Amino acid sequence: MPTPPTSATPASPAGVPHEQLANAIRVLAMDAVEAAKSGHPGMPMGMADVATVLFGKFLKFDPKTPQWPDRDRFVLSAGHGSMLLYSLLHLTGYEEMTIDELKRFRQLHSKTPGHPEVLQSGGIETTTGPLGQGISTAVGMALAERILNARFGDDLVDHYTYVIASDGDLMEGISHEAASFAGHLGLSKLIVLWDDNQISIDGPTSLSFTDDTLNRFRAYGWDVREIDGHNPQQITTAIEYARTTDAPSLIACKTIIGYGAPTKGGTHHCHGSPLGADEIKAAREKLAWTHEHFIVPEEITQVWRGFGQRGVAERENWQARLDGSDDSLRKSFGHAVSGELPADFDAVIDGFKSKVSAERPKLATRVASGNVLDVLVPAVPELIGGSADLTPSNNTRVKNTGAVQRGDFHGRYVHFGVREHGMAAAMNGMALHGGIIPYGGTFLTFSDYCRPAIRLAALMKSRTIFIMTHDSIGLGEDGPTHQPVEHVPALRTIPNLLVFRPADAVETAECWAIAMKSVHRPSLMALTRQNLPTVRTEHTTENLSARGAYILAPADGERKVTVFATGSEVEIALQARATLQADGIGTAVVSMPSMELFEEQDEAYQDEVIGENTVRIAVEAQVRQGWDRYIGRKGTFVGMKSFGESAPYQDLYKHFGITADAVVTAAKAKL
């Protein structure tokens, strides 16, 4: 069992004992949770000693320059213990984390929500709370550090990624994927401090969790140590050693949850609810803390502020190294961390579009996406991609591009393995780290595996690009397990996520351009397996897809019918239009690669595209959800009403009635 710090605990340089510094975290956590009448005080109280050592002796940061590129990254994966992070940020001097913000814990519009939300200008590197996501995102941050280190060298990129993780983080399946991946690559600058308190919300973790966690991580290729999480000397020694290994490190910190609470400490009763006034009073007495609520004595505050100031010299030395670098390196580094695209980016996209419109190839949009990457990856050094073991199917690897490997991170391609959950979270970490624009591929039906990380990417406004191929029954013979029918509509419900379903290679290039320019929102490409004709045969420099929807083929004569379609069904809509026009029925075809972008257009443009006084039909090899806003409740939808079947895709489209004849019949029935 862990033992409490004693009076012999080493003092800080200012003569303040370690336990008093740690107790400042404990009382702030107790007070804030009690004021909110909601929260998790136990974890901050239990991990206060570990956090004090980490921030006091090791973490490289400068609160006055929170987004310094070479800072260490700290991820509180155990996001329910958010008051640990908020207390640390306040004590070390982050200007945005005032004592008033701590008093407003969990209140509307505060910077101290119930779980940490990314605020890099205020020291919060990522949004955590869904357990397992934090540690998995941190793996991406550690990978980004190594990739940028290989590109720019030790003088500019040389920092650690530290994680405080809980039992729950290590139970969640995503953390297993991420840990395996980190061990495979030997991400030695990743250090995870596991709050091994053996308590969950239901009670002791033994109710559901009896893994041999230490040996599991050893099997992943991690360095593993077990320490008393209340002994500052053991904590110091363990972190010092972890910084010397050639593998990622797991430090199991044996702690007492709610340390200092006399009756609730060590139990699940302090996990997810306030301690209560009586318990807090008794805890203050036990901790010998005589100060009023939210009051930290000046002598303790000054020591904590000193920890925050410790990084100033390191940052200044780093800045001097950057300023002394040769012009090319300095400019390349500045360009990478700014996230800006090259000056010739639009010209690259325009050249690709022009070539496609002239040659009019018949390509699957997954192949078209790969062709776009062939021109983008050489032009944008920050673009780093991979696949969850579906590289030939996703078309995500550019020809002659080296792979990222253990000990050699110069490559531009990442083999994530069959780890869709972990890949998506790691991509978020790469984007949040900065200096990298990540993309990663799998099948669209497996977006369900990625969805928690996709949702967080949208919440965090990170430029993460998800490539999802085999986007409908059009994949054919693999059958309903692999044929997404509800996935595109479901993904469209996520706020701030751009979902693209391009109709041909031209639209695919336009969607890539939008995704690359969307600095504050993630994008998802839903791409076909089957070949599609080029429908944009007249070149235009304007990005028509940027408006979400546009009239691809206007009606000849009076417009009586409007057919909306996305992706592979645009071809079907055009075939139906030809038949209707031959019968004297004026028909317009609207290609809608992005509902989200169309919703952002002005009302006049939307009305023009929708054609309010026409028969309206939507064609999409997905379920109907989301289309009624354009076609109306009584409009006709030609699409899926069930799961798919296993057969060649041509047979499936006929079987499910997603055909030009069906569109024509529906239109005539409404006229």
Image (tube, helix red, strand yellow):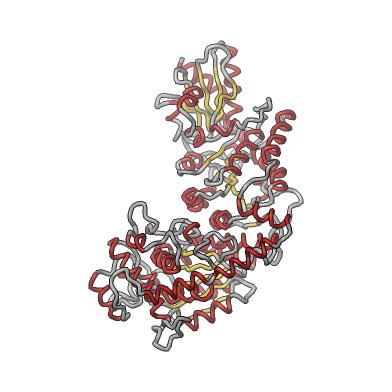
Pick the quarter of the image with the N terminus: bottom left
Residue 254 higher or lower than 556, as above or below? below
Residue at the bottom extreme, as displayed? 8
Picture coordinates of residue 407, whole percent (x, y): 70, 67
Does residue 516 appear in the picture of this structure?
yes
Residue 67 higher or lower than 442, as above or below? below
Does residue 409 appear in the picture of this structure?
no
Residue at the left extreme, as displayed? 278
Q: Residue at x 60, y 46 (%)?
A: 467
Q: Is residue 154 left or right of residue 270?
A: right
Picture coordinates of residue 257, whole percent (x, y): 37, 74
Picture coordinates of residue 259, whole percent (x, y): 36, 76
Q: Is residue 587 left or right of residue 628?
A: right
Residue 128: quadrant of the picture: bottom left
Q: How many marks?
A: 0
Q: Nearer the viewer, residue 99 or 53?
A: 99
Picture coordinates of residue 371, whole percent (x, y): 70, 41
Q: Residue at x 68, y 42 (%)?
A: 343
Residue 575: quadrant of the picture: top right
Residue 448 higher or lower than 188, as above or below? above
Q: Residue at x 59, y 21 (%)?
A: 553
Q: Residue at x 40, y 73 (%)?
A: 301
Residue at the right extreme, as displayed? 400
Residue 532 higher or lower than 312, as above or below? above
